[in-house]
Image: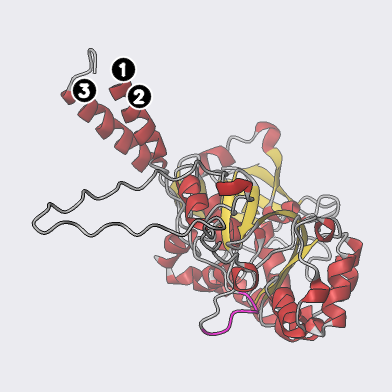
Amino acid sequence: MGHFSLHGVLLLLLSLSVIAATVSAHNITDILASNPDYSQFNSFLTQTKLCDEINRRQTITVLVLPNSVFSPVASKHPLPVIKNVLSVHILLDYFDPTKLHQISDGTTISTTLLQTTGTAEGNIGSVNITDLKGGKVAFGSAAPNSKLDSIYTKSVKQIPYNISVLEISAPIVPPGILTAPPPSSDLNITALLEKHGAKTFSSLIVSSGVIKTYQSTADKGLTIFAPTDEAFKAKDVPDLNKLTNADVVSLLQYHAAPKYIPYGSLKTAKDPISTLATNGAEKFDITVSVAGESVTLHTGVDSSRVADNVLDSTPLSIYTVDNVLLPSELFAKSPSPAPAPAPGLAPTPSPAPAPGAAAPSPVLASPPAPAGLTPEGSPADAPSQAAEHSSDKGAGVHVEGCAAVTVSVGLVAFVVSSIFMH
C-alpha cells in the first residue's frame, strides 16, 4: 500500500461516509408528513407521482399549500388538472428565505416542472418571484398580465442547495391551466401512436382487439410502450403470422402496464413491472435500467431504449420504444441439444476399476467460453437480466416509489481499490 497506512485508509473511509451522509437525499413525502396541515398536498404528490420527480432531482424548491388553501382546488378538478397545478408549484431551482430577499433587481423568473412536460405554452410553465420589500415576497404566473397574488408565508424545510420547501398563501394558477383534458378513455390512442411513428403497432392493437383492453384500463391507470415502425422492420422480429392469435394478443398486452408510470417514476423503478399479459404463474414482466437520462426496458430476451414520451396525462402514459419487446414466456430460447457422436464411432465404455484400485480423480470442468461466444459458431444468447442489473447497480441510483434518492457506494469502492493498487 506504499505510504498509506491502515489507519489512513480507515480515516478516508470515514470521511467518505460523512460526505455520503451529507449528500444523501431528500424525500418530499417524509418532509410533509411531519405536518398534517399539508396532508392533501402531500397525498396528491403521491397520486400524481410527482413525488418521484421531486425526489430524483438534486436542486428543487416546492411551494407548498396548506389544506385550507389547497382543498378548494383539489375538490373541484380532476387529477390531470391537479397535477398541472402542482407542477407549477415545483421550481427547478433552489430558493430559501435568504435567497428570496436577495433577488437581483427584485424580480426573477423561475422554470417549473410543468415546463418540462412540453405541454406548457409561452410562459405558462414559469413563475414570477418578486421581492416586495418590507419582508414580503410575492409569487405569480409569468404569463402576461398575471397577478402576483400569492405571498411567501414561512419556511418548512431546507437541505441547503438540494431542496427547499416553502409555504405560500395562495395557489399559482396560470391562465388556462384549470381546463380539464378529456378523460383517458376518450383519447384517440391510435391517432396518437400513428402521429408518433407507431402505425404498425396501432394497426395491430386494432385488428387484434387489444385496443379495447387498453381503453377499458386507461381511466384506472395505463402505460403503453409502443414499438416504432422501424422496430418492426428489424431482422430479429418474429413473423407474427406464425404466432397463434392468443400469442399475438399476449405480445401486444405485454407492451402495456396496468398502472400510470410517468417518466420520473419509470426512471426510479426498481422492481419488475407487471404488464397486461401477466397472468398467475406467467410473469410477463419488464425490468428497467437507467444510464443518465436514458431508460432501457429489459424482457429477458431482448432490450429496448425508451425513445419518446408521447403522452403524460394522469392516469395515462404513452411511450415509443426502439425495439419490439419480446417476452421470455413466448420467445425464450430452448437449450441446445448435446451433439450426437460422429457416424460409426460409438462411445467406448470406460473399463471398470480393478478391485481395490483407487477411485479415479474427478475431471475438472473446462472454463466457460468468453461472453458473446458459443460453440460451433452458433449465435450468442442475449445477456441475462442479472448481468445487466449487476452492471447498473454500481453506476447510479435506484429508488422505488417515493423513496429518497441515495448515494451510490461505487465511489467508496473505487477509491479503496485505487489505494490498494498503489
Label 2 or label 3, whichever comes before in sequence order: 3
Residue at the location (45% across, 52% down)? 26
Measure the C-alpha gap from mark 1 to mark 2. 6 Å
Measure the C-alpha gap from mark 3 to mark 1. 14 Å
Residue 407, compared with residue 350, is above or below; it is above
Within-10-Å neighbours for mark 1: few <14, some 14–19, many 20+: few
Q: What quarter of the picture does the N terminus occupy?
A: top left
Q: Which residue is mark 2?
A: 418
What coloring was used for the rendering? secondary structure
Q: Considering depth in this image, is 133 or 12 the residue closer to the camera?
A: 12
Q: Considering depth in this image, is 298 or 335 the residue closer to the camera?
A: 335
Residue 281 visible to the viewer: yes
Q: Considering depth in this image, is 32 or 265 the residue closer to the camera?
A: 265
Within-10-Å neighbours for mark 2: few <14, some 14–19, many 20+: few
Q: Residue 80, how many percent across, how many down?
A: 72, 72
Residue 77 visible to the viewer: no
Q: Residue 385, how many percent across, how many down?
A: 52, 57
Q: Quadrant of residue 318?
A: bottom right
Point out the stretch of residues depicted in magenta: 275-280
Q: Residue 198, how many percent across, how many down?
A: 86, 63
Q: Which residue is mark 1?
A: 422
Residue 60 disc label: none
Q: Quadrant of residue 266?
A: bottom right
Left or right, 320 with respect to 277, comes to right
Q: Considering depth in this image, is 399 or 132 the residue closer to the camera?
A: 399
Label 3 or label 1, whichever comes before in sequence order: 3
At label 3, which amino acid type do we have? Gly
Residue 8 disc label: 3
At label 1, which amino acid type do we have? His
Q: How many marks?
A: 3
